[in-house]
Image: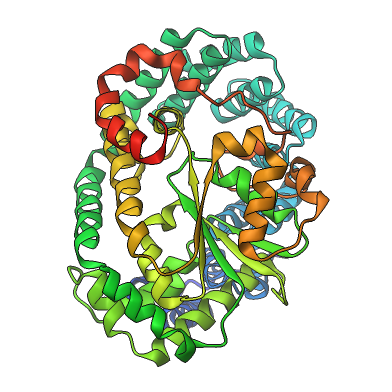
């Protein structure tokens, strides 16, 4: 049943409320933002768009029951049911609830007139669960609705590659690239996919050319991110100077004031260094819960401490100025929101927060969580840089570094140099885990990591790939970690030696430092 829209609500009033809600959210006043949207919803109760926005807002604050209530209301009052169900699914994807998204997309798929996009979304969800056959069937349904649908072509191509049908996949991708799709990001993803196929076919020079075609399409949309990336890298250099051993010692000595202390570890390192593989091994243990690449530590633990400081304030200034009461609140926020996000309580399990982006937030983690242990993933820098360069990442400040091999090397050195400078100053326990050793000796390295965390051995970690197939993974490495461990990616850089050679001299000092020279 569709509620008739009220037409007498002044559009200017609604616009003003939307602006107020956006401003409140920008200033981290999330409750005020939600209350403002609720006022707008009462003024225009038949406006499905407001309910969709409210659902997203509640979801971003980990109130999934509140999100579901608003999204369901949007569906009830909307005239276009399949489209609204699909939009509700997309809002769930925005706030990271894959299970809620799946439910809405499945309902949309059952409606008459469901668009191809719905089946593409369901195919991608099944792909992330390593259910390739089901995903392929859904991609086929999308193509039955629209044989030229570019996203469906791309998903089908990727599924063919993941299933080993490389030549068929290459033909499908080339059809996408020859289409008249006006979406440069979609065409770029097609070139990335073709690069992966050519790499698997050992046609490495052609693969690199395909990746370069992808970069050329992405570069215009990423151009404005360059200045932000440079500021991030400058801030990292500033932290190398300001986060001294004495500051870290001072924070460690304040641990008792922040109690009770928790069983907590952070798994980081540069992206594409094996963090996802190690995380899935650990998550297979019944005594461990892992959080995969969330923003909770940054957004809910660190950002509240920075409120009221100018943008140029140093990390040291923010952390040194934080009173015990606010540090305790940050800790409480972090663990509460993480449990809400995961849908489980920690109880007596060890929480491992896996996110390569946390590498440059190690000082903040050491201040807020003095009990934290750090697992740092290491891998041959040449393989790391090549893998980052090959990833089809949407434009953002960090991914903009990967638009060239030179930029990729610069970003790698920024991140890993910071860790190596910080390492001798850090008072928290840490363990470096090499990807190459993990794939060569899964049991031995897993035992060492669990012992470091103070956790007894459990044979289930050796079946991590079965565990990975039981959940949706957020990392770009989702396809690799749902399979048994393999050495296929070790030394992959040698296939591209000629292209990497101009940058190896810059990497050599770090290679020696990390033991890869």
Tell me the residue at 44%/27% (across/down).
390
How many numbered badges does the structure rendering display?
0
x%, y% of residue 450?
Answer: 67, 57
Q: Position of residue 423 (x, y in %)?
A: 37, 57
Q: In the depicted view, which residue is nearer to us: 80 or 212?
A: 212
Question: Which quarter of the image is occupied by the C terminus?
Answer: top left
- Can you name the residue that lies furthest to the right here? 459
Q: Quadrant of the N terminus?
A: bottom right
**What's the residue at 54%, 26% (across, down)?**
490
Whether residue 298 is visible, yes or no, is yes
* 306 versus 495 height, above or below: below
370 or 128: which is nearer to us? 370
Residue occupying the point 75% across, 53% down: 284
Residue 500, above or below 448: above
474 lies left or right of 405: right
Residue 130 placement: quadrant: top right
Residue 190 falls left or right of residue 15 = right
Q: Nearer the viewer, residue 94 or 363?
A: 363
Image location of residue 365, percent across then percent down: 43, 69
In the image, taking residue 361 as reference, residue 335 lies left or right, namely right
Position in image of residue 331 (x %, y %): 50, 80
Q: Can residue 307 be seen?
A: no
Figure colour scheme:
rainbow
Residue 240 left/right relative to 21? left
């Amino acid at each position: 049943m569709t509620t008739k829209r009220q037409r007498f609500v002044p559009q200017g009033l609604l616009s003003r409320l939307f602006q107020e809600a956006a401003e409140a959210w920008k200033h981290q006043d999330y409750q005020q933002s939600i209350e403002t949207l609720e006022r707008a919803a009462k003024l225009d109760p038949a406006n499905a768009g407001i309910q969709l926005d409210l659902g997203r807002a509640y979801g971003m604050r980990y109130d999934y029951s509140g999100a579901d209530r608003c999204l369901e209301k949007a569906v009830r009052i909307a005239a276009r049911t399949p489209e609204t169900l699909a939009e509700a699914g997309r809002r769930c994807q925005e706030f990271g609830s894959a299970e809620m998204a799946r439910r809405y997309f499945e309902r949309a798929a059952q409606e008459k007139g469901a668009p191809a996009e719905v089946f593409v979304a369901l195919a991608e969800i099944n792909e992330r669960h390593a259910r390739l056959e089901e995903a392929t069937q859904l991609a086929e349904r999308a193509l039955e609705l629209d044989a030229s649908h570019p996203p469906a072509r791309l998903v089908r191509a990727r599924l063919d590659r993941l299933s080993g049908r490389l030549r068929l996949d290459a033909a499908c991708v080339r059809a996408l690239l020859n289409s008249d799709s006006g979406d440069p990001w979609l065409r770029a993803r097609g070139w990335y996919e073709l690069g992966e196929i050519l790499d698997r076919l050992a046609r490495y020079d052609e693969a690199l050319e395909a990746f370069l075609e992808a970069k050329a399409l992405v570069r215009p949309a990423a151009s404005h991110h360059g200045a932000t990336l440079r500021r991030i890298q400058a801030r990292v250099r500033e932290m190398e100077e300001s986060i001294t051993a004495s500051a870290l010692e001072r924070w460690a000595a304040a641990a008792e004031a922040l109690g009770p202390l928790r069983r907590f570890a952070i798994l980081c390192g540069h992206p594409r260094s094996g963090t996802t593989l190690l995380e899935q091994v650990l998550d297979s243990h019944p005594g461990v819960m892992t959080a995969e690449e969330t923003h909770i530590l940054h957004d809910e633990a660190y950002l509240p401490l920075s409120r009221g400081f100018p943008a140029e304030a140093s990390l040291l200034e923010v952390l040194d100025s934080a009173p015990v009461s606010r540090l305790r609140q940050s800790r409480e926020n972090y663990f509460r929101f993480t449990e809400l996000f995961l849908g489980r309580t920690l109880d007596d399990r060890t929480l491992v927060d896996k996110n390569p982006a946390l590498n440059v937030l190690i000082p903040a983690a050491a201040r807020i969580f003095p009990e934290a242990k750090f697992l740092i993933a290491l891998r041959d820098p040449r393989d790391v840089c090549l893998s980052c360069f090959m990833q089809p990442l949407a434009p953002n400040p960090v991914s903009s570094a990967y638009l060239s091999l030179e930029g990729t090397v610069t970003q790698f050195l920024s991140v890993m140099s910071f860790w190596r400078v910080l390492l001798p100053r850090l008072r928290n326990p840490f363990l470096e885990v090499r990807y190459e050793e993990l794939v060569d000796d899964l049991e031995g390295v897993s035992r060492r990591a669990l012992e470091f965390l103070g956790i007894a051995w459990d044979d289930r970690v050796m079946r991590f790939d079965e565990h990975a197939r039981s959940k949706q993974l957020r990392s770009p490495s989702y396809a690799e970690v749902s399979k048994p461990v393999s050495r296929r990616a070790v030394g992959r850089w040698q296939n591209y030696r000629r292209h990497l050679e101009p940058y190896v001299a810059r990497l050599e000092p770090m290679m020696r430092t990390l033991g890869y020279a």
